[in-house]
Amino acid sequence: MKIAIIGYGKMGQSIEQIAQGRGHNVIYKTNEKPNLSQAKQADVAIEFSIPEAAFDNISECIKNQIPVISGTTGWLDQFEDVARLVEKNHSKFLYASNFSIGVNLFFKLNSMLAQMMKTQKEYKVDISEIHHLEKKDAPSGTAISLAEQIIEHTNYKSWSHPPKAKNSKDIPIKAFREKGIFGTHEISYRSEIDDIEIKHTAHNRKGFALGAVLASEWIVNQKNHGCFNMNDVLNI
Ligand SMILES: NC(=O)C1=CN([C@@H]2O[C@H](COP(=O)(O)OP(=O)(O)OC[C@H]3O[C@@H](n4cnc5c(N)ncnc54)[C@H](OP(=O)(O)O)[C@@H]3O)[C@@H](O)[C@H]2O)C=CC1
Ligand SMILES: O=C(O)C1=N[C@H](C(=O)O)C[C@H](O)C1
C-alpha cells in the first residue's frame, strides 16, 4: 500500500514506523498543506496534524478522491461539512478520536457500564483525562467520545469542560497535562457508599499508530464510499 502522511509529527512518525513494519511504502509526507499531485499517487492519506488544519487537509483529499484516515482532534464541529463533501464526491473517509484497539474495547465497556448505571440514581459520573504537555486541545477527543457514549445510554444531556458545579445533567470532564503521559482516561461513578471506576492507560503511541494503519488497510479494500469509523474496521 502506498501511503501519504499529512502531519509528520509524533503520530506521523510512529505511523511511518508501523506502516513500514507491515510492508507498506510511505511515498509522501508533509507538515504543511498537502501537495495534491504528490498525495494523489498514494492509495490512502493518513492525516494527524493540528486542529486548525485538519478540515482543509481532509477536504482536499476527499475532493481529489484520495481515501483519507484522520485522527486529528479538536475540529469535529466541522464533521457534517466533511460528511457532505464525502457524499458529493463519492469518496471514502474514516475518523476515530482514538485508533487504539484497547481504547475501542474500553469504549464498548464504557457503553455497557453506562447502560447499567442509567437506573442507579445515587451515582454521579465524571471523566478525567491526562496527556503530555504538548497536547493542543482539551478535553481530549477520546474524553468527548466517552462522554457522548454515556449520554447515549443514560439521562445525562451534555458534558462540560471545565466542569460546571451543580448541573446534574452535565458530565464534568477534567483535563490534566503532565510530562510524558501518552493518554490516560478514567470514568468514575461516585456515590456516598462507594465508587466504580474504569480506566485506560496508553504506555506509548504504538496502539494509536497500529490502529491507523489497520484502518488504512481496511479502507483501501472498502468498495463503498462514505464516512466510516473503527467499529467498521474492528470486529468487536
Ligand atoms: N485519534 C488518535 O488515535 C490519536 C489522535 N491524536 C491527535 O493527532 C493530532 C496530532 O498529534 P501529534 O502527532 O501528537 O502532534 P504533533 O504536534 O507532534 O504533530 C502535528 C504535526 O502537524 C504538522 N502540521 C502543522 N500544520 C500542518 C498543516 N497545515 N498540514 C499538515 N501538517 C501540519 C506539525 O508541523 P510543525 O510542527 O512544523 O508545525 C506537526 O509536525 C492531534 O490532534 C492529536 O490529538 C494523537 C494521538 C492518537
Ligand atoms: O494528543 C494526543 O496525544 C492524543 N490525542 C487523542 C485524543 O485527543 O483523544 C488520542 C490519544 O488520547 C492521544
Image: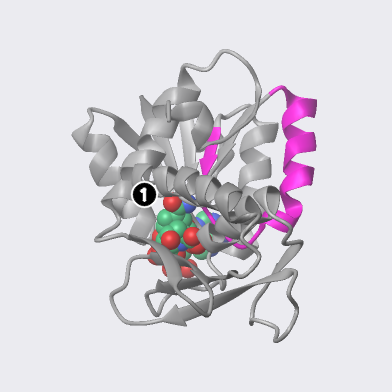
- Judged left or right of residue 60, residue 33 is left
The secondary structure that dominates the magenta segment is helix
Q: Nearer the viewer, residue 47 or 31?
A: 47
Residue 11 visible to the viewer: yes
Residue 80 occupies which quadrant of the picture? top right
Determine whether 19 is above or below 70 in the image: above
Q: Is residue 216 left or right of residue 156?
A: left
Percent x, y for residue 65?
Answer: 63, 26
Residue nearer the viewer, 230 or 89 = 230
In magenta, the rendered stretch is 68-90
Check disc 1 and give the amino acid type: Phe
How would you rate the neighbour count of disc 1 (Cα within 10 Å): few for under 14, some for 14-19, many for 20 or more? many
Disc 1 marks which residue? 208
Label 1 sits on a secondary structure element that is helix
Coordinates of residue 20 in the picture (x, y in percent): 23, 36
Q: Is residue 113 magenta?
A: no
Q: Is mark 1 within 8 Å of ligand 1?
A: yes
Residue furthest front in the image: 193
Q: Is residue 107 left or right of residue 79?
A: left
Q: From this viewpoint, is residue 34 visible?
A: no
Q: Magenta span has 78?
A: yes
